[in-house]
Amino acid sequence: MRLLFIGDVVGKPGRKIIVQTLPGLIAREKLDLVIVNGENSAAGSGITPDIHRELIGIGVDCITLGDHIYKRREINPILESAPNIVKPANFPPSAPGKPWTVVTARDGTKVAVISLLGRVFMRPVDCPWAAVERVLAELPRDVKVVFVDFHAEATSDKQLMGRYLDGRVAAVLGTHTHVPTADEEIFPDGTAFQCDVGMTGPYHSILGRLIERVQETTLTFNPTQFDVATDDVRLCGSIVDIDPTTGRATAIRRLRVDEADIAKLQPAKPPTPVM
């Protein structure tokens, strides 16, 4: 089976390029499953019920989240009820949302999806290693393919998690830094790994925010509104090929879609009828 993981969607520009290109990507790449980190999809922070419906409606199969999960309180009922969105599994049990879910890919493969939050330079949170052990013990035994989104700041955290889970999950792919890394590989026991798949949003920015606003606050300490930027929008993620019988990855490659690629991924317009 073939899985696409799309990194942190930043605001309306990030959502728009997904809407414009995902159906074409599913067809071109023969994708069986699409997972998206949507924690920055609502104006750069959080997610709303409408955005959840929009992403699922365009072909996204599951949404992972991170440290901005509760920025929009209206998402809480969706976190509790929808089968295709997960909270970080190392959040307290009382926090709204599910620590894991199982979705069915287009080829019929059942895939467990887990989100975890790192600890280095992040908000205080429970141990992600203990949390993933709990989840793995809870998963149905017939689910062979397990995907982990590790939402973390430090590359050391991410590499540690990848090595820790090597051979036990299909992929450990990182989010949160918004910068795509060139370290994708298959570890010795069959787990696909990448420190960060990058953001989906405006790259003429500071991590998706207007350059001028971030510079002003950084240089002067004068607070500004870090609005989402608009230019050089890209979709970034990684495609992982997985053996559904063993749950091990066989290939991983980075994916980048620029604004110039949008027309290539949209269906051709039907010819104008001759009157």
Image: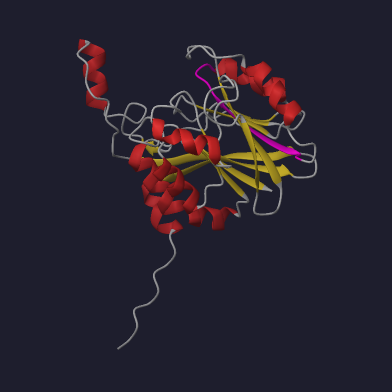
Query: With respect to residue 267, does 204 lie above or below?
Result: above
User: Would you say 1 lies left or right of 271 here?
Assistant: right
**In percent of the image, x 47 and y 53: which residue is there?**
58
Which of the 4 image quadrants contains residue 179? top left
Q: Do we see residue 144 in this rendering?
A: yes
Q: Nearer the viewer, residue 179 or 221?
A: 221
Q: Is residue 161 left or right of residue 208?
A: right
Quadrant housing the C terminus: bottom left
Above or below: residue 148 compared with residue 62:
above
Magenta span includes 144: yes
Which x, y percent locates residue 28?
A: 55, 56
Side of 92 relative to 242 (left or right):
left
Instruction: Decide if residue 159 is on the left or right side of residue 46.
Output: right
Q: Which residues are magenta?
A: 143-154
Residue 199 makes an appearance in the image:
no
At which x and y percent is residue 30? 61, 55
x%, y% of residue 251? 68, 40
Which residue: 50% across, 48% down?
Answer: 56
Question: Count of labels shown?
Answer: 0
Residue positioned 59% across, 20% down in the render: 90
* Image point (65%, 20%), residue name: 131
Task: Judge whether residue 123 is colored magenta.
Answer: no
Instruction: Locate residue 132: give its quadrant.
Output: top right
Q: Nearer the viewer, residue 169 or 219?
A: 169
Q: Nearer the viewer, residue 114 or 173?
A: 114
What is the x, y in percent for residue 17?
39, 47
